[in-house]
Image: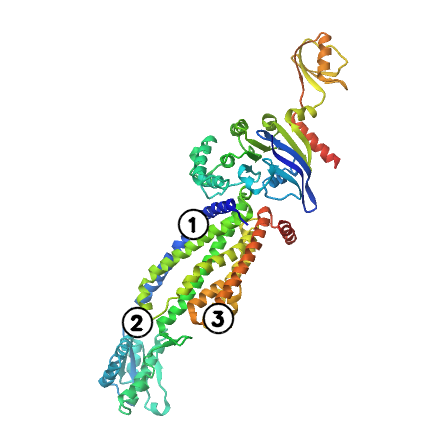
Amino acid sequence: MLNRKGWRKTWTIATFEFLTAVRRPGYLITTFGMPLFLAAYSGIVAIPAYFASRAVREPAVYGVVDPGGVLRLQADVTSSESPMPEAVKRALDATGRGGAVDTEFMESNFVFRPFPSEADARTALAGRKLKGYYVVPADYIAKGVVDIYTPDTINIAGSEARGQFSNLVRQRLLSGRLDELTSARVVSPLKDTRRFSVTKSGGMADGGQAAGIVRIVVPLIFTVLFLMSVLMTSGYLMQGTATEKENKVVDVLLASANPDEILAGKLLGLGGAGLLQIAVWMMFLLVGGIGIVPLLLTSQVEMPWIALALAIPLFLIAFLFFGSLMLGTGSLGSNMREAQQLAMVWSLTAALPMMMMAVLLREPHGTVARVMTWLPFSAGPLIMFRASTDLDFLNWWEVAGSFAVLLLSTWIAIRIGARLFRIGLLSTSRPKLAEILRQARLSS
Amino acid sequence: MVILAFDNIAKSYGDTPALRGVSFDVHAGEIFGLLGPNGAGKSTLIRILMDIIRADSGEVRVFGETRRREHLDRLGYLPEERGLYTKLTVTDVMTYFGSLKGLSRAEARRRSREWLDRVELPHVAGWKIDRLSKGMSQKVQIAAVLLSDPELCVLDEPTTGLDPVNVRLVQDLLLERRRNGRTTILSTHQMNQVEALCDRVAMLNRGRLVVYGEVDEVRRHHSLPEVRVHARGPLPPVPAVASVIEDGEGSWRLMLADGSVPSDALATLVRAGAVIDRFEPMLAPMEDIFLRVVREGTEAC
């Protein structure tokens, strides 16, 4: 146990470690540079994508050769000039879905142009005036076979064009045989949909595409940031100690403070640096995310406030857990390289939730997720993940139990870490297991 | 007054004994030499004093009490294997070390500047450590240890690698500490420094205390029965002197006969008509004593 003087030394070490860490170029680059880099990267990706999406809006002209007159095309037909009767449009407007129809049609940019013969269409395609052409044989009704001619180049919009052409064929075949509304439903039975999510308590929330994306992205971001910060901060901890061993500062430190004070000071100082890093990232996220706030509000997505509130205590506990183990194990190495090798097992263990992310995203509250919630190596990120995915399926006793497991494991980890740290600090080379056990018995 | 006492300290690393029942005292206000060949157990003893490692048995008493962690703020330590945080500035490192010894941050910073002046390095205050030369780095480390003005300070080879000017600078700092009543334990292999600086010494060999006492007394004890004489004219033969070697220019070295003491030899020489300007018992250099003790220890094994 530390007395008042011991805490003062711990505070001195913590302040030193904090200031040293936050002034490190690597820390500054990661803390401030990474969000800027990601923003810049997103910009670099988004700008060409925007222009590409604009380019797609230029009409793609497809030829239609219809010797049997199945489709009865007299002139160019575009999606926006869909032969949807005004009555249908009015009916849809009355249900409030007219906008959606407009949107759908505005996004279509295919033009189907009749050609009197296959030879004419081929000439146009060879001259690259067409993206392709369809030949609807006279016996189409009997056989259902349509020939498709495309250029000898890649055309990723081909399947979309086929879909649009199918719609055109359906419309033309049904025209005059069914009433117009039914005809419209046959052509496009799921033209527009509304999604709703029913929570465990029976409440309803928006289940649309935006909400779905947010529900996946938010826990993912949380988990990634959480793990990144824990691992990076633990890495600084290990790096600092290895450097002290390499620089031979250890004896001077040990002549001023005991290993428990040094360990506590390092954990506090670098834990603070890690928290600051998370805070900065969150700030960037908030600033960067202001643009999507209206989207979140209109899509009725609930922000994972509980997960946000749990982030700080979970970070501290997880950092103490992994930090103690990494520091203790890493201090057994005689230099940075050895320290990293020794501590790698903890990095891999900490990354387990990320490795299992595909399974977790599929079933955020499934058996795998529930089991991992109780394991000390994954409990922190899993609580964060599950709390930000859907709080209704996370039982309070699971949270309480996980915290208890984490706290107990962290206490054990600190005890083991402190003992390994003491042994490691005094060893000039990597001690053998027998020596570690012997020293551990002596220092107990 | 005894400021530090080792009482029957024993320590083994596995099956290898490093210290075998070492006991000695260090007095307040003295410069105490801790000597011994490599592997003699000096560093182990120092690390036990600083509570870096624990003795298997025995007791360490400092400031009249059994040594506790709380005493560390009054102790200073410059280890032989030493270094600094290479990526930090000189002032930051010194301030940190001073703060760890209980100084406030502001006071540690003020004293850092003051001590950089004293070791003639005021211009490096803002430099990163890795910009310093080896000698500069060494002086910064010494200053970092001394800035908290420890009552008892252990310096392990503080002048290794320093040029003669800086060796003198460090020696002056140690002498000043003695004048101020501070105690310094100097662990070194440089015997000329021991003769010049130390009041008393302890020499370890193979984990045992083999020499302990005041420097002059130790030298006298380990000296041959030999005197140096400056005289006018030849020296007459006397029974108290077994042999005479002339060094030239009126200087002789006399080996005394068994059972004779220097005062007997002087009296009989004067009675025999020798005109003597200077007569001094020859003290063995610490280096010879060191070599002899180490050799005897090796042969005994």
Mark-to-mark CA distance, 1 and 3? 36 Å
What's the mark number on residue A56?
2
Residue at disc 2, secondary structure: helix
The structure residue drawn at horizontal position 73% and vertical position 11%, both measured from the top left corner, is B268
Mark-to-mark CA distance, 2 and 3? 35 Å
Nearer the N terminus, badge 1 or badge 2? Answer: 1
x and y, in percent, of residue B266 in the image:
70, 13
**Is the Cβ of the residue at disc 1 closer than 8 Å to that at disc 2?**
no
Chain for disc number 2: A
Query: Is any part of residue B279 visible from this angle?
Result: yes
Q: Amino acid at mark 2?
A: Val
Asked if marks 1 and 2 fall on the same chain, the answer is yes
Q: Nearer the viewer, mark 1 or mark 2?
A: 1
Which residue bears the numbered disc 1? A22
| Colour mode of the rendering | rainbow
Chain for disc number 1: A
Which residue bears the numbered disc 3? A359
Vertical position of residue A438 compared to residue A58: above or below: above
Residue at disc 1, secondary structure: helix
Asked if marks 1 and 3 fall on the same chain, the answer is yes
Please state which of residues A116 and A338 is positioned toward the viewer in this rendering. Answer: A338
Vertical position of residue A14 compared to residue B275: above or below: below
